[in-house]
Amino acid sequence: MPDTGDVAVFGAVAGVDLSDLPQDRLVIVSPLRTDHEACERAGLRVALDRPEAPVLSIVILPRAKALARGLIATAIAATDGPVVVDGQKTDGVDSILKDCRKRGELGEVIAKAHGKLFVLRGDAADFADWALPDTPRDVGEGFVTVPGIFSADGIDPASRLLADNLPARLGKTVADLGAGWGYLARRALERDEIAELHLVEDDHTALDCARRNVTDPRARFHWADATRWRPDQPLDAVIMNPPFHTGRTAEPALGQAFIANAAACLAPHGRLWLVANRHLPYEATIARHFAHCEEIAGDNRFKLLAAHRPTRHKR
């Protein structure tokens, strides 16, 4: 570890213990609002963009291969010193290590349990083809995405299923909690009665794509934690395809927190429309927060749940 200078940390930082690193020199680079809030509470510096010339960079590999390569290319181009790459075998670290051997100079490689860590030096030009694209790519039907965000390769089938089954009338004020790159919101805005639709998204990169995909003037964009965001006035409807992973870990409690917050955002007459993987245990949570719930559609993979009359109406 160099004695002075910034140490940049890129990647999937949720749940990663950074306490052994020099806290006053760390700069966490993350697009997630929840990461920014957690780092600020812990007294750590956090940024959307890489710091100027860190003396060391650490890349914690995400699952998405294109994003993992892009973060390594960014770190190599930005860093005056070495880049440390840390990843799990389930996240493709062995493949990344093999590819890095062909492009840069590898130092020590440490393997422990199901993970590996290695030290990498290289020239930016040797990793240029790994760089993240400057502009989003077209994934069909007029939508664009970028690597690393949810459903980056195309329209998520669960979101499509929900959009196809939403009622003709949702109300005047609607929110899409966990709006991603905007597919569900744009489909909902086909309804003329909607006066405002709030897209609430934790991932700044995904929200930037949503701004490109949803150009309707009724759209309102919020970079925020969807489990805590609240509207100025109670809503008529909430639609959502909530995430159920925190970092690498499956965590149904995350979706359950979305449900609880949806109830708190709704007016007494408000309704929730939700799609989820069939195995996720959301019905009991909905029953705690709504007077009525029913499955309105689904298949062997997904279920569509409609709930109304929030019973814990807190503002």
Image: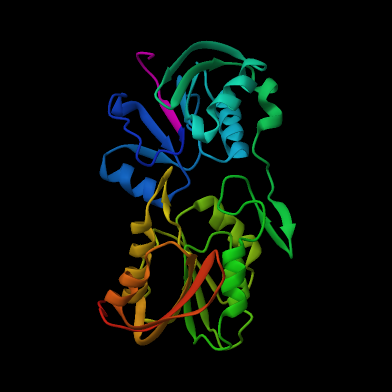
Quarter of image, res 216: bottom right
Please provide percent x and percent y for residue 29: 45, 38
Residue 136 lies left or right of residue 290; in this view the side is right
Looking at the image, the residue that sits furthest to the front is: 300
Q: Residue at x 35, y 64 (%)?
A: 256
Please provide percent x and percent y for residue 44: 31, 37
Q: What is the magenta segment's predominant secondary structure?
A: loop
The total of numbered circles placed on residues is 0
Looking at the image, residue 34 lies above or below residue 235: above
Looking at the image, residue 37 lies above or below residue 61: below
Span shown in magenta: 1-9
Q: Residue at x 50, y 52 (%)?
A: 204
Q: Nearer the viewer, residue 53 or 159?
A: 159
Q: Nearer the viewer, residue 222 or 188?
A: 188
Q: Residue at x 64, y 17 (%)?
A: 123
Residue 247 seen in render:
no
Residue 147 lies left or right of residue 315; in this view the side is right
Location of the C terminus by quadrant is bottom left
Residue 71 lies left or right of residue 247; in this view the side is right
Asked whether 41 falls inside the magenta stretch, the response is no
Please provide percent x and percent y for residue 205: 55, 50
Residue 37 seen in render:
yes
Colouring mode (rainbow / by chain / secondary structure / one colour): rainbow
Please provide percent x and percent y for residue 199: 50, 67
Location of the N terminus by quadrant is top left
